[in-house]
Image (spheres, helix red, strand yellow):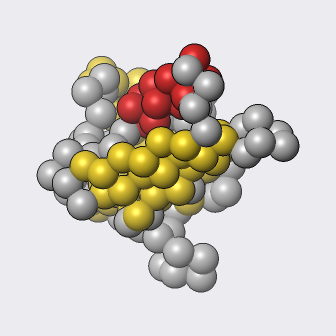
Amino acid sequence: MKNIDLDLIEKLADNMNEHSLTEINLEIGGQKLVLKKETKTKEVVATSIPQKTVVKPMEKVEKKEKVSSDGVTGNVITSPMVGTFYRSPAPGAEVFVQEGQTINAGDPVCIIEAMKMMNEVSSQFSGKVVRILVEDGVVVKKGDKLFIIE
């Protein structure tokens, strides 16, 4: 099943503006995306069904060992997109990972909410979580460092 990714949404929004469209409906493999332009504010509003998609491990991965300012070394998991960082799958739920916890490659480590879509981010590395670099609820950019795995 192909995921509707942020790049496709951005291209559709640009296409809407370029051709003065007010609405685009798209369905790919059971996922539905509706983009509507509000006539008052001229903004594009996106909704998605279902609201949870899985982000595959990023293509661009920092594989070298990195040293942070306080001497912590390890592999770095970076954000695959712009959005809001959440440590747990829902408010009040248990966090995906804690510092000191051992994880395997492919284990979910956080959620990045982008355009009302909840995108689960999985680790590319196996090892111990030595540092969580981002606070819960903070907006991150693509490439921001999220975790250090030893």
In the image, taking residue 36 as reference, residue 43 lies left or right, namely right
Extreme-right residue of the structure: 40
In the image, taking residue 6 as reference, residue 92 lies left or right, namely right
Q: Count of labels shown?
A: 0
Residue sitting nearer the eye, 145 or 37? 37
Q: Looking at the picture, how far across and down is residue 71, in whole percent?
A: 52, 31
Residue sitting nearer the eye, 7 or 37? 37
Residue 114 against residue 77 in the figure, above or below: below
Residue sitting nearer the eye, 82 or 125? 82
Q: Looking at the picture, how far across and down is residue 82, in whole percent?
A: 55, 36
Q: Looking at the picture, how far across and down is residue 18, in whole percent?
A: 57, 17
Write the residue at 53% across / 56% down.
47
Residue 39 against residue 117 in the figure, above or below: above
Q: Looking at the picture, how far across and down is residue 130, in whole percent?
A: 43, 50
Residue 86 against residue 41 in the figure, above or below: below
Is residue 129 visible to us here?
no
In the image, taking residue 10 as reference, residue 120 lies left or right, namely left
Write the residue at 46% across / 36% down.
9
Extreme-left residue of the structure: 1
Extreme-bottom residue of the structure: 92
Write the residue at 67% across / 56% down.
137
Write the residue at 50% across / 69% down.
88
Q: Quadrant location of residue 63?
A: top left
Question: In which quadrant of the rendered image does the C terminus lie?
Answer: top left
Is residue 124 visible to us here?
yes
In the image, taking residue 29 as reference, residue 51 lies left or right, namely right
